[in-house]
Image (tube, rainbow, N blue to C red):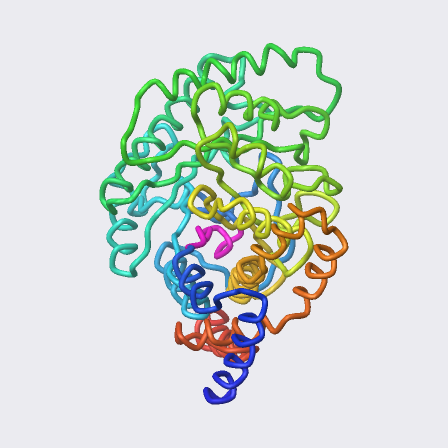
Amino acid sequence: MKDNKVTQAYEIAKERYAQLGVDVEKVLTTLEQIPLSIHCWQTDDVSGFENPDGQLTGGIQTTGNYPGKARNIDEVRQDLKEALSHIPGNHRLSLHAIYGDFGGKFVDRNEIEPKHFESWMQWAKENNMKLDFNSTSFSHPKSGELSLSNPDDSIREFWIEHTKRSREIANAMGEYQNDPCIMNLWIHDGMKDETVNRLKYRQLLKESLDEIYKTPYKHMVDCLESKLFGIGAESYTVGSHDFYLAYGVKNDKVVTLDIGHFNTAENVADKISSLLLFTKEIMLHVTRPVRWDSDHVVTINDSTLDLMKEITRADALNKVHIGLDFFDASINRIGAYVVGSRSTQKCLLQALLEPIERLRKYEANGQYFERLALLEEAKTMPWGAVWDMFCLRNDVAIGDSFISEVQKYEKNVSLKR
């Protein structure tokens, strides 16, 4: 698309939005300052570097066998740089503990150290990125059904040590980059069928968390992520939303809302305003559940739009961290990154362009017909022209032109693996 056409369309859009009281230039400045925490595990289907050909366990599954997945740390970084070259703005990178730079040696989960992630810190700095971190409890001989809630002391202590070390690594990352590293804790613990010792496992999980969080850190933020159920844990999940919500509020920890970890009929956006009253921040894992936590690539749909609108309506952009968590092995992995990230940003842009002051005024005055009418009109405003200008200013592909670039990378790089 020609730059002058983009500019012309943008000027018309800006004028139309101004009539609704929306400052589009201010919106673009705001959007520029909102990073996505982009997950590293879309590059290789959550395989990591311990055993890249190993089978996923712990309620996690990827489907498909699209050719060209990353096989090592260099290919992961190469793919990330390619994907980011098509995503406007400056973003963060979220690493799982199994993606350390282990130098070709096996380092067990309870032995990981900051030194195993020093090259990631350097790489992120060179590429103008900040890092976030995740402990990894799945796909390990000691994973089984239960990790931090396991009645076996040796297994539970193994995972406690792993999580302690993960927090230490996150703190080192935060100190190095002079910006807090968000450290997310998610465990798969649960059972497939009827469970009679629910309280016992949750008591053990609470005790494990208490031990893990004994050491305070200045350069990282602790987050707790719940799950509704997983494959092989359909009947009982130890770390439920209720459990982590209560623990987070009591212990001043951030609660992570993964969009796929709730009943698909549940409106996750509605949780934002409630959590903001009782927790200092919120972490999001944005994905697209299809019938369950299937982690499909994010698209512009009602759930993502509602989520972004609720954040902006609550003036909570400085309190909500937006991370991505989808992994699809059935399509081009770089293309998945680009589509999912850009779709998330497009939803955020539409939320920022909402004529919120007029809408609030209508609501305060009891003018509900006017509120509904304006909400509907806002849906068909020319936000796409604003998006194109955002891409132009960030020197990334406008429209669908990134498709050919991803195809070129596939032909020249990934298909040769």
> What residue sits 68% from the left and 24% below the top?
236
**Above/below status of 39 relative to 133:** below
The magenta stretch spans which residues?
35-45
Which of the 4 image quarters holds residue 217?
A: top left
Residue 376 is left or right of residue 93, and the answer is right
Q: Residue furthest front?
A: 365
Identify which residue, 67 or 295, lies in the foreground.
295
Q: Looking at the image, which is closer to me, 24 or 399?
A: 24
Residue appearing at x 39%, y 72% in the figure: 394
The residue that appears at 68% across and 69% down in the rendered structure is 380
Q: Is residue 3 magenta?
A: no
Q: Position of residue 7 (x, y in %)?
A: 48, 84
> How many numbered marks have been drawn onto this rendered protein structure?
0
User: Is residue 40 in the magenta section?
Assistant: yes
Which one is nearer the viewer's eye here, 101 or 31?
31
Q: Is residue 375 left or right of residue 28?
A: right
The percent coordinates of residue 132 (x first, y second) are 38, 44
Residue 395 placement (x, y as % from top left): 39, 76
The one of 117 and 313 positioned closer to us in this rendering: 313
Left or right placement of residue 278 versus residue 368 in this view: left
Q: Quadrant of residue 234?
A: top right
Q: Is residue 141 above or below residue 392?
A: above
Up-down relation of residue 285 to residue 274 (above or below): below
Q: Position of residue 333 (x, y in %)?
A: 54, 62
- Point 48% across, 68% down: residue: 24
